[in-house]
Structures are given as structure tokens and as C-alpha cells.
Amino acid sequence: MLYGSPIPITAFRDFDAVRDYILTLEDAGFDFTSTSGHVLGQPSGTNPQRPDRQYVGPFYDPIVTFSYLAGLTRRIRFITGILILPAWPTALAAKQSAELAILSGGRFELGVGISWNAAEYRALGQKIQGRGARIEEQVAVLRLLWSEPYVTFEGRYHNLDKVGLNRTNIPPIPIWMGTESGEVALRRVARIADGWMSLGDPLTDLPRLQQYMREAGRDPSQLKVRGPLVAGDDTKAAVERARTLAAAGVTHINVVAPPDRGPQVALRGIVATRKALAEALG
């Protein structure tokens, strides 16, 4: 079992605080961290699709932020959680991911998703329609660009004619997918993803996802699965939750703080929870 904790989106307003947070996580024995890949924020009530949603945090750019943090750390891994891949040029995502993987000594993993925010897609010059099919083709192109010196590929969304990243030392970059519980999304994970970030409770959907993987001819035990665990005052409950997640097939536990905790109080609780998990489960 691996343990991680995300960079709080709204708690920190400068990189010094982010730096200190990540260094504390690494010192406490955490294995990975993550941060959101949204480019633009939006106030509540402006998006008719999700009028209750708002994005008002600073949204640290994950590639830039992780590049900075990789130079300050030695062990902790970095996972985008998530990059809205269909809104990105695929070749640019391939290039930046490869550079970060090299810079970090192989400590980068790419988490991607399709999002729901049409306004963000429009602002980035992309269409939200067809994003599911586009991300599947993007994953194929990413893997080709990371593994082949020159790529020729013609698809619905990409036309590559003998182009390459001109890198021969790219470490493996696992591709995670963050999804809700819809069948189409879960079957996409089952077919092409290396890891799954559930946007809900993974215990609800994991049996179905594992069955979809078997139907796709893949071994469910080879899939990385991230599940959330809230760090509270009751460490015994946290240990039992971790045991339940592990028994279901979760491989990465993402320790998060209750929303009403300030950053320093939250960090102390997260570190205490990690210590309790290490003592009980290793």
C-alpha cells in the first residue's frame, strides 16, 4: 500500500507554503502527492451544467509546480489529479510529461480526465463535444511519442508525420484516469488506463470496474487504484477504513483533511494519520 496527500487547492497562496507542505509530507513517509490540473477558475452560479460548483482556488499548474518540487525532494512521487487532457494539445502534454519524468528521476505519473466545464474548454480553444473519444486517441498518441523515436499516426483527432520528442531516456509514465461512476467512463479505464482515481467512493464501483477489465482481457490486479481517506481525530477508524480499501483492491490511499481544518491543523492530522497507518499496516 502506498500513501499520499494532495496539495490543498485553497489553503495556500504562495509556493513557499506549498514547498514546506511537500517537504513535511516526504519527511513523514508519504509516497505521493497530487494537484489539480484545471487551467481556469470560475465562480459559482455561472455554469448551467453545475451551478453549485465553483473553482476559486489558485490552481497551481501541475507541470510547473511538480518541476519545482522535484528539485527539492528525492523520493515522493507526483501525480496530476487530474489534467484535463482533451483541452490540451497532445504533443505538448507528451513533451512536458516526458521532461518532468526525466527531471524527477522517474517520479512522475500522469492523471487525466475529461471534465464537465464547457466554459474552460471554450476558453482553451477546444470543443467539449467528443472529449471521451479524443482522450482515448490521446492516450494512444502519448504512449507512442514516449516510446518511439519517430511517430506516424493518422486518427480522428491527430495527424503525425514522422515526428518525435527526440528523447531516448524517458522513464515509464503510468497514465491514471479520474472518473465518476458511469459505465462508459469505467469501461474506458478498463481498456486503456494504468490507474484509476475514483471521484466518488471506489468501494462502490471497483467490483464493476474489475469485471470490465476481465471482459477487456486485462488482469484487474495490475490496475493501480486510488481511494480517499479522511484524516480525523479517530485514527482507529482511519486504520479500519484503510484495511477495507486494501481488501477491495485499492493500492494508493489518498489522505485528505476535513474541509473545516486550517492548513497547519490539517497537516498535523494528515501526518498523525500516516503514522497510525504505518504502525498498524506497515
Image (cartoon, rainbow, N blue to C red):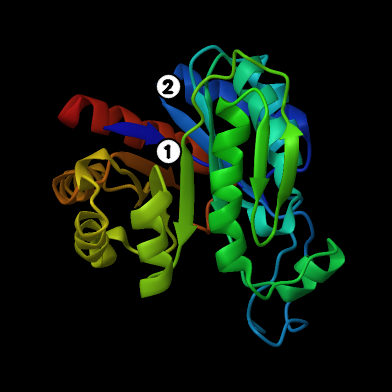
The quadrant of the image that shows the C terminus is top left
Relative to 248, residue 152 above or below = above
Q: Secondary structure at mark 2?
A: loop
Residue type at mark 2 is Ala
Residue type at mark 1 is Ile
Q: Is residue 98 left or right of residue 133?
A: right
Q: Is residue 127 left or right of residue 138?
A: right
Query: Which residue is tagged 2?
Result: 28
Q: Where's residue 147, x and y in %?
A: 55, 26
The quadrant of the image that shows the N terminus is top left
Relative to 275, residue 195 above or below = below
Q: Where's residue 47, x and y in %?
A: 73, 82
Query: Which residue is tagged 1?
Result: 270
Q: Is residue 190 left or right of residue 262?
A: left
Q: Residue furthest bottom?
A: 48
Q: Where's residue 30, x and y in %?
A: 42, 26
Q: Nearer the viewer, residue 191 or 220?
A: 191
Relative to 121, residue 69 above or below = above
Q: Nearer the viewer, residue 40 or 178?
A: 178
Q: Is residue 233 left or right of residue 46?
A: left
Identify the residue shown where x is 48% and y is 56%: 178
Q: Where's residue 73, x and y in %?
A: 59, 15
Identify the residue shown where x is 37% and y is 64%: 186
Q: Few, some or many C-alpha atoms within 10 Å of disc 2 (few <14, some 14-19, many ≥20)?
A: some
Q: Quadrant of residue 2?
A: top left
| Residue 181 in sight here | yes
